[in-house]
Image (spheres, rainbow, N blue to C red):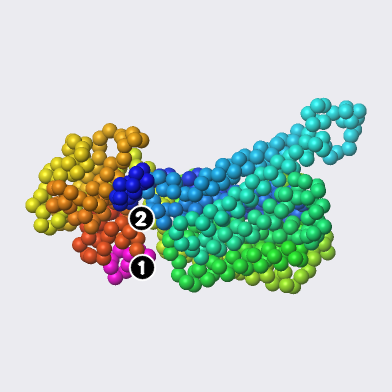
Amino acid sequence: RFQRCVRAKRECRAVLQLPRPRQAKMQPLAYLAVRALLGWIQFVERSERAFLNSPLALVAAGAVHSWAVVYSLFVAVHTRAMRFDGYHEGYVEHLPGTVAWTETIAVASLWIWVLAGFTTAAVRILDEDADGLPVGLDDLKGNPITKLVRSPVFHTALGHAHSISCAGLFLSILLLCVTMAVMKGGITVCEISLALVSIGFALPHALMAVRRLSDDLDQVFSAVLPQQAAEAAAAEAAAMGPQLCIILALADAPGHAYMWQNVIYFICSVAFLAAVVACWGSPPKGANTALPPEVVETVVCLSLDMIAAVAIVLSYPHLNTWFFWMSCLILVGVAAAAQTREVREFYIDWLEPLLVVRSDTHKRFPSQQRMTMRRNSWVVALMCASTALWDIVLHPAPEVLNSAALARATAPLPNIFMLRWLPTSDTKEAKEMLPVISEALQLDATNLEVEETFPEHRLMLFKYKGTERNETQSPVYLDWQAAMWAPTGKLAEVADKKFPAALNLTACSEVQNVQEQSDAAEKQLSEVGLSTKDESRAAYVAACEWFKHRIVYGEGEEKKPSPKF
Protein backbone atom coordinates (compact mmCIF):
# COMPACT_ATOMS: atom_id res chain seq x y z
CA ARG A 1 0.00 0.00 0.00
CA PHE A 2 2.76 2.42 0.87
CA GLN A 3 4.67 1.51 -2.30
CA ARG A 4 1.63 2.26 -4.45
CA CYS A 5 1.28 5.62 -2.72
CA VAL A 6 4.97 6.45 -3.16
CA ARG A 7 4.80 5.61 -6.86
CA ALA A 8 1.91 8.05 -7.15
CA LYS A 9 4.14 10.72 -5.47
CA ARG A 10 1.67 11.14 -2.64
CA GLU A 11 2.22 11.64 1.05
CA CYS A 12 1.93 8.34 2.88
CA ARG A 13 1.53 8.98 6.58
CA ALA A 14 -0.46 6.11 7.99
CA VAL A 15 -3.49 6.86 10.14
CA LEU A 16 -2.93 5.83 13.72
CA GLN A 17 -4.51 2.50 14.56
CA LEU A 18 -4.26 0.44 17.69
CA PRO A 19 -3.15 -3.18 17.18
CA ARG A 20 -2.69 -5.41 20.16
CA PRO A 21 0.99 -5.38 21.12
CA ARG A 22 2.46 -8.87 20.85
CA GLN A 23 4.82 -8.31 23.70
CA ALA A 24 1.85 -7.96 26.08
CA LYS A 25 1.30 -11.71 25.70
CA MET A 26 4.73 -12.46 27.15
CA GLN A 27 4.47 -10.81 30.55
CA PRO A 28 7.07 -12.49 32.83
CA LEU A 29 5.19 -11.81 36.05
CA ALA A 30 4.95 -15.53 36.81
CA TYR A 31 8.68 -15.87 36.22
CA LEU A 32 9.43 -13.05 38.65
CA ALA A 33 7.06 -14.52 41.24
CA VAL A 34 8.66 -17.98 41.11
CA ARG A 35 12.11 -16.47 41.12
CA ALA A 36 11.34 -14.37 44.19
CA LEU A 37 9.80 -17.35 46.01
CA LEU A 38 12.83 -19.57 45.34
CA GLY A 39 15.14 -16.77 46.44
CA TRP A 40 13.19 -16.40 49.68
CA ILE A 41 13.27 -20.16 50.36
CA GLN A 42 17.03 -20.12 49.77
CA PHE A 43 17.36 -17.21 52.21
CA VAL A 44 15.35 -19.02 54.91
CA GLU A 45 17.31 -22.26 54.44
CA ARG A 46 20.73 -20.64 53.94
CA SER A 47 22.22 -22.16 57.10
CA GLU A 48 21.48 -25.76 56.06
CA ARG A 49 20.78 -25.96 52.31
CA ALA A 50 21.65 -24.24 49.05
CA PHE A 51 20.93 -24.65 45.36
CA LEU A 52 23.40 -26.86 43.53
CA ASN A 53 25.79 -25.05 41.20
CA SER A 54 25.92 -27.70 38.46
CA PRO A 55 26.28 -27.09 34.70
CA LEU A 56 23.00 -28.88 33.92
CA ALA A 57 21.09 -26.81 36.48
CA LEU A 58 22.61 -23.59 35.15
CA VAL A 59 21.67 -24.46 31.56
CA ALA A 60 18.13 -25.55 32.48
CA ALA A 61 17.52 -22.43 34.58
CA GLY A 62 19.25 -20.30 31.98
CA ALA A 63 16.54 -21.08 29.44
CA VAL A 64 13.78 -19.55 31.54
CA HIS A 65 16.02 -16.60 32.43
CA SER A 66 16.58 -16.10 28.71
CA TRP A 67 12.84 -15.98 28.13
CA ALA A 68 12.62 -12.88 30.33
CA VAL A 69 15.54 -11.30 28.46
CA VAL A 70 13.91 -12.07 25.09
CA TYR A 71 10.70 -10.48 26.36
CA SER A 72 12.61 -7.33 27.25
CA LEU A 73 14.23 -7.10 23.83
CA PHE A 74 10.87 -7.60 22.10
CA VAL A 75 9.48 -4.71 24.15
CA ALA A 76 12.44 -2.54 23.12
CA VAL A 77 12.11 -3.42 19.42
CA HIS A 78 8.36 -2.75 19.34
CA THR A 79 8.80 0.47 21.31
CA ARG A 80 11.39 1.66 18.79
CA ALA A 81 9.07 0.83 15.89
CA MET A 82 6.16 2.65 17.50
CA ARG A 83 8.33 5.63 18.40
CA PHE A 84 9.79 5.97 14.91
CA ASP A 85 6.99 4.90 12.57
CA GLY A 86 4.08 5.87 14.80
CA TYR A 87 1.65 3.50 16.46
CA HIS A 88 -0.46 2.89 13.38
CA GLU A 89 -2.10 -0.01 11.63
CA GLY A 90 0.47 -2.34 10.16
CA TYR A 91 3.48 -0.89 12.02
CA VAL A 92 4.57 -4.49 12.61
CA GLU A 93 4.99 -4.80 8.85
CA HIS A 94 7.81 -2.25 9.05
CA LEU A 95 9.80 -4.36 11.51
CA PRO A 96 12.86 -6.17 10.15
CA GLY A 97 12.30 -9.77 9.09
CA THR A 98 14.61 -10.98 11.87
CA VAL A 99 11.93 -10.09 14.42
CA ALA A 100 9.52 -12.70 13.06
CA TRP A 101 12.29 -15.31 12.79
CA THR A 102 13.42 -14.60 16.32
CA GLU A 103 9.89 -14.90 17.65
CA THR A 104 9.57 -18.34 16.02
CA ILE A 105 12.92 -19.49 17.40
CA ALA A 106 12.11 -18.21 20.89
CA VAL A 107 8.68 -19.85 21.03
CA ALA A 108 10.02 -23.17 19.73
CA SER A 109 12.93 -23.10 22.19
CA LEU A 110 10.61 -22.32 25.08
CA TRP A 111 8.34 -25.25 24.19
CA ILE A 112 11.35 -27.57 24.06
CA TRP A 113 12.35 -26.36 27.52
CA VAL A 114 8.80 -26.84 28.86
CA LEU A 115 8.54 -30.37 27.47
CA ALA A 116 11.99 -31.31 28.76
CA GLY A 117 11.20 -29.84 32.18
CA PHE A 118 7.86 -31.62 32.54
CA THR A 119 9.45 -34.86 31.37
CA THR A 120 12.16 -34.51 33.98
CA ALA A 121 9.55 -33.89 36.70
CA ALA A 122 7.49 -36.88 35.52
CA VAL A 123 10.58 -39.09 35.59
CA ARG A 124 11.27 -38.07 39.16
CA ILE A 125 7.70 -38.86 40.20
CA LEU A 126 7.66 -42.24 38.46
CA ASP A 127 11.12 -43.21 39.58
CA GLU A 128 11.36 -41.63 43.00
CA ASP A 129 13.12 -44.73 44.34
CA ALA A 130 15.79 -44.71 41.61
CA ASP A 131 18.49 -43.63 44.04
CA GLY A 132 17.59 -46.18 46.70
CA LEU A 133 19.15 -49.60 47.21
CA PRO A 134 17.37 -52.63 45.70
CA VAL A 135 15.46 -54.73 48.24
CA GLY A 136 14.49 -57.60 45.96
CA LEU A 137 14.96 -59.29 42.61
CA ASP A 138 12.10 -57.28 41.08
CA ASP A 139 13.92 -54.04 41.87
CA LEU A 140 16.94 -55.30 39.93
CA LYS A 141 14.92 -56.24 36.86
CA GLY A 142 12.50 -53.33 36.71
CA ASN A 143 9.68 -52.79 34.23
CA PRO A 144 10.15 -51.30 30.73
CA ILE A 145 9.21 -47.79 31.89
CA THR A 146 11.66 -47.95 34.79
CA LYS A 147 14.41 -49.16 32.49
CA LEU A 148 13.72 -46.33 30.06
CA VAL A 149 13.74 -43.55 32.63
CA ARG A 150 16.88 -44.95 34.26
CA SER A 151 18.79 -45.37 31.02
CA PRO A 152 21.76 -43.04 30.44
CA VAL A 153 20.59 -42.41 26.87
CA PHE A 154 17.28 -41.02 28.08
CA HIS A 155 18.92 -38.67 30.59
CA THR A 156 21.44 -37.57 27.96
CA ALA A 157 18.56 -36.76 25.59
CA LEU A 158 16.87 -34.65 28.27
CA GLY A 159 20.13 -32.81 28.90
CA HIS A 160 20.53 -32.12 25.18
CA ALA A 161 16.94 -30.86 24.99
CA HIS A 162 17.68 -28.31 27.71
CA SER A 163 20.88 -27.31 25.91
CA ILE A 164 19.09 -26.91 22.57
CA SER A 165 16.37 -24.76 24.13
CA CYS A 166 19.04 -22.66 25.82
CA ALA A 167 21.03 -22.25 22.62
CA GLY A 168 17.88 -21.23 20.71
CA LEU A 169 16.92 -18.60 23.27
CA PHE A 170 20.44 -17.24 23.45
CA LEU A 171 20.49 -17.01 19.65
CA SER A 172 17.21 -15.08 19.87
CA ILE A 173 18.82 -12.63 22.27
CA LEU A 174 21.75 -11.96 19.96
CA LEU A 175 19.47 -11.59 16.90
CA LEU A 176 17.24 -9.09 18.71
CA CYS A 177 20.27 -7.08 19.83
CA VAL A 178 21.50 -6.90 16.23
CA THR A 179 17.99 -5.99 15.05
CA MET A 180 17.74 -3.19 17.58
CA ALA A 181 21.09 -1.83 16.38
CA VAL A 182 20.16 -1.73 12.67
CA MET A 183 16.53 -0.59 12.96
CA LYS A 184 15.49 2.82 11.71
CA GLY A 185 15.48 5.62 14.24
CA GLY A 186 18.09 6.75 16.68
CA ILE A 187 19.16 4.27 19.32
CA THR A 188 18.82 5.51 22.89
CA VAL A 189 21.28 5.11 25.76
CA CYS A 190 18.73 2.91 27.49
CA GLU A 191 18.65 0.59 24.47
CA ILE A 192 22.45 0.46 24.39
CA SER A 193 22.49 -0.44 28.08
CA LEU A 194 19.84 -3.12 27.50
CA ALA A 195 21.90 -4.62 24.66
CA LEU A 196 25.05 -4.70 26.81
CA VAL A 197 23.29 -6.45 29.70
CA SER A 198 21.58 -8.90 27.31
CA ILE A 199 24.83 -9.85 25.57
CA GLY A 200 26.65 -10.11 28.90
CA PHE A 201 23.94 -12.52 30.03
CA ALA A 202 23.73 -14.54 26.81
CA LEU A 203 27.38 -15.26 26.02
CA PRO A 204 28.35 -17.39 29.06
CA HIS A 205 25.04 -19.29 28.93
CA ALA A 206 25.43 -19.94 25.19
CA LEU A 207 28.95 -21.22 25.77
CA MET A 208 27.72 -23.64 28.44
CA ALA A 209 24.87 -24.87 26.23
CA VAL A 210 27.21 -25.51 23.28
CA ARG A 211 29.70 -27.35 25.49
CA ARG A 212 27.00 -29.72 26.71
CA LEU A 213 25.94 -30.62 23.17
CA SER A 214 29.31 -32.14 22.25
CA ASP A 215 31.98 -33.80 24.37
CA ASP A 216 34.65 -32.86 21.84
CA LEU A 217 33.74 -29.19 22.06
CA ASP A 218 33.68 -29.45 25.81
CA GLN A 219 37.23 -30.78 25.84
CA VAL A 220 38.41 -28.04 23.48
CA PHE A 221 36.86 -25.26 25.57
CA SER A 222 38.12 -26.84 28.81
CA ALA A 223 41.66 -26.75 27.47
CA VAL A 224 41.42 -23.10 26.40
CA LEU A 225 39.20 -21.43 29.01
CA PRO A 226 39.85 -21.06 32.76
CA GLN A 227 38.31 -23.79 34.87
CA GLN A 228 34.71 -23.04 35.91
CA ALA A 229 34.87 -19.64 34.19
CA ALA A 230 31.70 -20.06 32.12
CA GLU A 231 29.72 -21.51 35.04
CA ALA A 232 30.72 -18.67 37.36
CA ALA A 233 29.98 -15.99 34.76
CA ALA A 234 26.61 -17.57 33.92
CA ALA A 235 25.58 -17.74 37.58
CA GLU A 236 26.54 -14.09 38.14
CA ALA A 237 24.74 -12.98 34.97
CA ALA A 238 21.56 -14.85 35.93
CA ALA A 239 21.46 -13.25 39.39
CA MET A 240 20.46 -9.76 38.15
CA GLY A 241 20.58 -9.79 34.34
CA PRO A 242 16.95 -10.71 33.56
CA GLN A 243 15.49 -8.18 36.01
CA LEU A 244 17.75 -5.41 34.72
CA CYS A 245 16.74 -6.19 31.13
CA ILE A 246 13.04 -5.92 32.00
CA ILE A 247 13.57 -2.66 33.88
CA LEU A 248 15.71 -1.08 31.15
CA ALA A 249 13.26 -2.07 28.42
CA LEU A 250 10.31 -0.53 30.25
CA ALA A 251 12.32 2.53 31.34
CA ASP A 252 12.59 3.54 27.68
CA ALA A 253 8.82 3.48 27.09
CA PRO A 254 8.19 7.14 28.08
CA GLY A 255 10.37 8.07 25.09
CA HIS A 256 12.68 10.44 26.93
CA ALA A 257 15.33 10.42 29.65
CA TYR A 258 17.34 13.12 31.37
CA MET A 259 21.10 13.11 31.03
CA TRP A 260 21.62 11.90 34.59
CA GLN A 261 19.25 9.00 33.95
CA ASN A 262 21.20 7.94 30.87
CA VAL A 263 24.43 8.11 32.87
CA ILE A 264 22.99 5.82 35.57
CA TYR A 265 21.62 3.36 33.00
CA PHE A 266 24.95 3.14 31.18
CA ILE A 267 27.01 2.84 34.37
CA CYS A 268 24.69 0.05 35.52
CA SER A 269 25.28 -1.95 32.35
CA VAL A 270 29.05 -1.44 32.59
CA ALA A 271 29.08 -2.43 36.28
CA PHE A 272 27.05 -5.54 35.45
CA LEU A 273 29.52 -6.55 32.72
CA ALA A 274 32.45 -5.86 35.05
CA ALA A 275 30.97 -8.19 37.70
CA VAL A 276 30.40 -10.95 35.13
CA VAL A 277 33.97 -10.60 33.81
CA ALA A 278 35.34 -10.61 37.35
CA CYS A 279 33.54 -13.88 38.11
CA TRP A 280 34.81 -15.28 34.80
CA GLY A 281 38.39 -14.52 35.78
CA SER A 282 38.03 -15.54 39.42
CA PRO A 283 35.15 -18.00 40.06
CA PRO A 284 33.68 -17.53 43.55
CA LYS A 285 33.14 -21.26 44.19
CA GLY A 286 34.01 -24.67 42.80
CA ALA A 287 32.01 -26.90 40.49
CA ASN A 288 29.02 -28.86 41.78
CA THR A 289 29.03 -27.01 45.09
CA ALA A 290 26.02 -25.78 47.01
CA LEU A 291 26.72 -22.48 48.72
CA PRO A 292 24.05 -19.83 49.38
CA PRO A 293 24.49 -16.29 48.03
CA GLU A 294 25.47 -13.46 50.34
CA VAL A 295 22.61 -11.90 52.30
CA VAL A 296 23.14 -8.55 50.59
CA GLU A 297 22.94 -10.20 47.16
CA THR A 298 19.68 -11.91 48.13
CA VAL A 299 18.17 -8.60 49.26
CA VAL A 300 19.25 -6.89 46.03
CA CYS A 301 17.84 -9.66 43.84
CA LEU A 302 14.51 -9.72 45.68
CA SER A 303 14.30 -5.93 45.41
CA LEU A 304 14.94 -6.09 41.66
CA ASP A 305 12.27 -8.78 41.29
CA MET A 306 9.74 -6.55 43.02
CA ILE A 307 10.70 -3.39 41.11
CA ALA A 308 10.55 -5.23 37.77
CA ALA A 309 7.07 -6.56 38.56
CA VAL A 310 5.83 -3.12 39.61
CA ALA A 311 7.29 -1.59 36.44
CA ILE A 312 5.42 -4.12 34.29
CA VAL A 313 2.10 -3.43 35.99
CA LEU A 314 2.59 0.33 35.73
CA SER A 315 3.53 0.06 32.07
CA TYR A 316 0.57 -2.21 31.27
CA PRO A 317 -2.32 -0.94 33.43
CA HIS A 318 -4.69 -3.62 32.12
CA LEU A 319 -2.70 -6.11 34.24
CA ASN A 320 -3.70 -4.22 37.38
CA THR A 321 -6.70 -6.46 38.14
CA TRP A 322 -8.15 -8.31 41.10
CA PHE A 323 -6.51 -11.50 39.78
CA PHE A 324 -3.08 -9.86 39.97
CA TRP A 325 -3.59 -8.67 43.54
CA MET A 326 -5.04 -12.03 44.57
CA SER A 327 -1.96 -13.72 43.11
CA CYS A 328 0.25 -11.32 45.08
CA LEU A 329 -1.54 -12.20 48.31
CA ILE A 330 -1.15 -15.91 47.59
CA LEU A 331 2.56 -15.40 46.88
CA VAL A 332 3.03 -13.52 50.15
CA GLY A 333 1.16 -16.27 52.02
CA VAL A 334 3.25 -19.03 50.45
CA ALA A 335 6.45 -17.13 51.27
CA ALA A 336 5.33 -16.48 54.86
CA ALA A 337 4.50 -20.17 55.28
CA ALA A 338 8.11 -21.00 54.47
CA GLN A 339 9.01 -19.74 57.96
CA THR A 340 7.59 -22.92 59.48
CA ARG A 341 9.68 -26.10 59.40
CA GLU A 342 6.83 -28.37 58.25
CA VAL A 343 6.05 -26.26 55.19
CA ARG A 344 9.74 -25.88 54.34
CA GLU A 345 10.15 -29.64 54.39
CA PHE A 346 7.34 -29.91 51.85
CA TYR A 347 9.07 -27.35 49.61
CA ILE A 348 12.44 -29.06 50.06
CA ASP A 349 10.97 -32.41 49.10
CA TRP A 350 10.05 -31.01 45.69
CA LEU A 351 13.28 -29.04 45.29
CA GLU A 352 15.59 -31.69 46.76
CA PRO A 353 17.45 -32.56 43.52
CA LEU A 354 18.48 -28.90 43.30
CA LEU A 355 18.19 -27.62 46.89
CA VAL A 356 20.70 -29.89 48.64
CA VAL A 357 22.68 -29.85 51.86
CA ARG A 358 25.05 -26.92 51.65
CA SER A 359 28.76 -27.40 51.08
CA ASP A 360 31.50 -26.37 53.46
CA THR A 361 32.37 -22.70 53.55
CA HIS A 362 36.01 -23.36 52.61
CA LYS A 363 34.85 -24.17 49.05
CA ARG A 364 34.12 -20.48 48.55
CA PHE A 365 37.16 -18.83 46.94
CA PRO A 366 37.95 -15.33 48.32
CA SER A 367 38.85 -12.46 46.01
CA GLN A 368 38.77 -8.83 47.09
CA GLN A 369 38.72 -7.48 43.54
CA ARG A 370 35.81 -9.71 42.51
CA MET A 371 33.78 -8.77 45.58
CA THR A 372 34.40 -5.08 44.94
CA MET A 373 33.09 -5.42 41.39
CA ARG A 374 30.05 -7.36 42.53
CA ARG A 375 29.18 -4.93 45.33
CA ASN A 376 29.49 -2.02 42.92
CA SER A 377 27.10 -3.75 40.54
CA TRP A 378 24.58 -4.33 43.35
CA VAL A 379 24.58 -0.67 44.38
CA VAL A 380 24.35 0.65 40.82
CA ALA A 381 21.63 -1.89 39.94
CA LEU A 382 19.45 -0.61 42.78
CA MET A 383 20.08 2.97 41.64
CA CYS A 384 19.16 2.03 38.07
CA ALA A 385 15.97 0.24 39.11
CA SER A 386 14.90 3.09 41.40
CA THR A 387 15.55 5.66 38.67
CA ALA A 388 13.56 3.69 36.10
CA LEU A 389 10.66 3.20 38.50
CA TRP A 390 10.67 6.92 39.33
CA ASP A 391 10.55 7.76 35.62
CA ILE A 392 7.72 5.30 34.92
CA VAL A 393 5.67 6.63 37.84
CA LEU A 394 6.15 10.34 37.14
CA HIS A 395 6.42 10.18 33.35
CA PRO A 396 4.11 7.34 32.26
CA ALA A 397 4.24 6.08 28.70
CA PRO A 398 1.52 7.39 26.38
CA GLU A 399 -1.68 5.51 27.03
CA VAL A 400 -1.81 4.40 23.42
CA LEU A 401 1.09 2.05 24.16
CA ASN A 402 -0.35 0.22 27.12
CA SER A 403 -4.11 0.52 27.54
CA ALA A 404 -6.34 -2.48 26.94
CA ALA A 405 -9.26 -0.11 26.22
CA LEU A 406 -7.25 1.58 23.52
CA ALA A 407 -6.06 -1.75 22.16
CA ARG A 408 -9.71 -2.63 21.51
CA ALA A 409 -10.49 0.74 20.00
CA THR A 410 -10.34 -0.40 16.38
CA ALA A 411 -13.63 -2.30 16.72
CA PRO A 412 -15.98 0.49 17.95
CA LEU A 413 -13.97 3.37 16.43
CA PRO A 414 -12.79 2.91 12.85
CA ASN A 415 -10.56 5.38 11.02
CA ILE A 416 -11.27 8.95 12.04
CA PHE A 417 -10.58 11.55 9.33
CA MET A 418 -10.35 15.31 9.75
CA LEU A 419 -11.14 18.33 7.63
CA ARG A 420 -10.35 21.86 8.76
CA TRP A 421 -11.82 24.47 6.48
CA LEU A 422 -10.27 27.79 5.61
CA PRO A 423 -11.57 30.96 7.28
CA THR A 424 -12.34 32.31 3.79
CA SER A 425 -14.44 29.30 2.85
CA ASP A 426 -18.11 29.87 2.08
CA THR A 427 -18.90 26.25 3.00
CA LYS A 428 -19.02 25.93 6.78
CA GLU A 429 -21.74 23.37 7.46
CA ALA A 430 -21.11 19.63 7.84
CA LYS A 431 -23.89 18.71 5.46
CA GLU A 432 -22.27 20.92 2.83
CA MET A 433 -18.81 19.46 3.47
CA LEU A 434 -19.72 15.81 2.87
CA PRO A 435 -20.46 16.26 -0.87
CA VAL A 436 -17.11 18.02 -1.28
CA ILE A 437 -15.31 15.15 0.50
CA SER A 438 -17.19 12.44 -1.41
CA GLU A 439 -16.25 14.14 -4.70
CA ALA A 440 -12.57 14.19 -3.74
CA LEU A 441 -12.67 10.52 -2.70
CA GLN A 442 -14.91 9.51 -5.59
CA LEU A 443 -17.36 7.94 -3.17
CA ASP A 444 -21.08 8.14 -2.58
CA ALA A 445 -21.81 10.68 0.17
CA THR A 446 -23.94 8.06 1.95
CA ASN A 447 -20.72 6.13 2.69
CA LEU A 448 -19.48 8.99 4.87
CA GLU A 449 -20.72 9.97 8.29
CA VAL A 450 -20.00 13.03 10.41
CA GLU A 451 -18.66 12.13 13.85
CA GLU A 452 -18.23 15.57 15.41
CA THR A 453 -17.88 19.19 14.42
CA PHE A 454 -15.97 21.98 16.18
CA PRO A 455 -17.19 25.26 14.65
CA GLU A 456 -14.95 27.33 16.91
CA HIS A 457 -11.94 25.52 15.43
CA ARG A 458 -13.34 25.20 11.88
CA LEU A 459 -12.91 21.44 12.23
CA MET A 460 -14.99 18.41 11.30
CA LEU A 461 -14.37 14.73 12.11
CA PHE A 462 -15.89 12.07 9.89
CA LYS A 463 -15.51 8.38 9.09
CA TYR A 464 -16.02 5.95 6.26
CA LYS A 465 -18.89 3.51 6.85
CA GLY A 466 -19.03 1.78 3.47
CA THR A 467 -18.08 -1.76 2.60
CA GLU A 468 -14.58 -2.96 3.39
CA ARG A 469 -12.17 -2.65 0.50
CA ASN A 470 -10.30 -5.62 -0.89
CA GLU A 471 -6.55 -6.01 -1.30
CA THR A 472 -6.52 -4.57 -4.81
CA GLN A 473 -8.04 -1.27 -3.65
CA SER A 474 -6.15 1.38 -1.71
CA PRO A 475 -7.45 2.10 1.81
CA VAL A 476 -9.75 5.08 2.24
CA TYR A 477 -7.41 6.74 4.72
CA LEU A 478 -4.57 6.78 2.18
CA ASP A 479 -6.89 8.20 -0.49
CA TRP A 480 -7.98 10.95 1.92
CA GLN A 481 -4.41 11.78 2.91
CA ALA A 482 -3.38 11.93 -0.73
CA ALA A 483 -6.36 14.16 -1.51
CA MET A 484 -5.44 16.52 1.35
CA TRP A 485 -1.80 16.56 0.33
CA ALA A 486 -2.67 18.08 -3.05
CA PRO A 487 -6.37 19.10 -2.96
CA THR A 488 -8.13 19.87 -6.25
CA GLY A 489 -11.52 21.18 -7.29
CA LYS A 490 -13.92 22.29 -4.57
CA LEU A 491 -11.75 20.68 -1.89
CA ALA A 492 -8.90 23.08 -2.72
CA GLU A 493 -11.24 26.02 -2.10
CA VAL A 494 -12.41 24.67 1.26
CA ALA A 495 -9.68 22.63 2.95
CA ASP A 496 -6.69 23.80 4.99
CA LYS A 497 -4.16 21.43 3.44
CA LYS A 498 -1.55 22.21 6.11
CA PHE A 499 -3.72 20.60 8.80
CA PRO A 500 -3.37 16.80 9.32
CA ALA A 501 -5.88 14.64 7.47
CA ALA A 502 -6.24 12.06 10.25
CA LEU A 503 -5.73 11.69 13.99
CA ASN A 504 -2.39 10.44 15.21
CA LEU A 505 -2.57 9.39 18.85
CA THR A 506 1.20 9.46 19.24
CA ALA A 507 1.00 13.14 18.32
CA CYS A 508 -1.96 13.50 20.70
CA SER A 509 0.21 12.28 23.55
CA GLU A 510 2.82 14.90 22.69
CA VAL A 511 0.50 17.89 22.27
CA GLN A 512 1.14 20.37 25.09
CA ASN A 513 1.25 24.10 25.55
CA VAL A 514 3.81 25.83 23.38
CA GLN A 515 5.75 26.96 26.43
CA GLU A 516 6.08 23.38 27.70
CA GLN A 517 6.81 21.74 24.37
CA SER A 518 10.11 19.89 24.10
CA ASP A 519 12.21 19.74 20.94
CA ALA A 520 11.39 16.05 20.50
CA ALA A 521 7.68 16.71 20.81
CA GLU A 522 7.85 19.59 18.33
CA LYS A 523 9.56 17.27 15.87
CA GLN A 524 6.82 14.69 16.36
CA LEU A 525 4.15 17.33 15.71
CA SER A 526 5.91 18.65 12.63
CA GLU A 527 5.99 15.12 11.21
CA VAL A 528 2.19 14.94 11.29
CA GLY A 529 1.76 18.41 9.84
CA LEU A 530 1.21 20.54 12.95
CA SER A 531 2.91 23.85 13.47
CA THR A 532 3.30 25.79 16.69
CA LYS A 533 0.44 28.12 15.81
CA ASP A 534 -2.07 28.28 18.63
CA GLU A 535 -5.09 27.88 16.31
CA SER A 536 -3.85 24.66 14.70
CA ARG A 537 -2.75 23.21 17.98
CA ALA A 538 -6.03 24.07 19.71
CA ALA A 539 -8.01 22.40 16.93
CA TYR A 540 -5.88 19.27 17.15
CA VAL A 541 -6.17 19.19 20.93
CA ALA A 542 -9.96 19.37 20.66
CA ALA A 543 -9.99 16.39 18.31
CA CYS A 544 -7.63 14.43 20.58
CA GLU A 545 -9.74 15.12 23.66
CA TRP A 546 -12.89 14.00 21.87
CA PHE A 547 -11.26 10.82 20.60
CA LYS A 548 -9.75 9.91 23.98
CA HIS A 549 -13.12 10.44 25.61
CA ARG A 550 -14.84 8.16 23.12
CA ILE A 551 -12.22 5.42 23.46
CA VAL A 552 -12.19 5.25 27.24
CA TYR A 553 -15.85 5.95 28.05
CA GLY A 554 -17.63 5.08 24.81
CA GLU A 555 -20.59 6.85 23.32
CA GLY A 556 -23.24 8.51 25.48
CA GLU A 557 -20.83 9.64 28.20
CA GLU A 558 -20.06 13.14 26.96
CA LYS A 559 -20.28 14.69 30.43
CA LYS A 560 -17.34 12.76 31.84
CA PRO A 561 -13.98 14.55 31.66
CA SER A 562 -11.46 13.23 29.14
CA PRO A 563 -8.49 11.36 30.62
CA LYS A 564 -4.96 12.63 30.28
CA PHE A 565 -2.56 10.94 27.90
* Residue 329 visible in this rendered orientation of the protein: no
Q: Say left or right for 279 vs 79.
A: right
Residue 101 among those drawn in magenta: no
Residue to which mark 2 is pinned: 506
Residue 65 in percent (x, y) is at 63, 51
Residue 517 among those drawn in magenta: yes
Residue to which mark 1 is pinned: 519
Q: Which of 535 and 454 is in front in this view?
A: 535
Q: Say left or right for 203 vs 77.
A: right
Span shown in magenta = 512-522
For image coordinates 87% across by 30% down, the residue present is 139
Q: Which of 113 and 500 is in front in this view?
A: 500
Q: Quarter holding the N terminus?
A: top left
Answer with mark 1 or mark 2, whichever residue precedes in sequence.
Answer: 2
For image coordinates 55% across by 50% down, the residue present is 71
Q: Quarter holding the C terminus?
A: bottom left
* Residue 228 visible in this rendered orientation of the protein: yes
Determine whether the residue tagged by mark 1 lies in a helix, strand or loop. helix
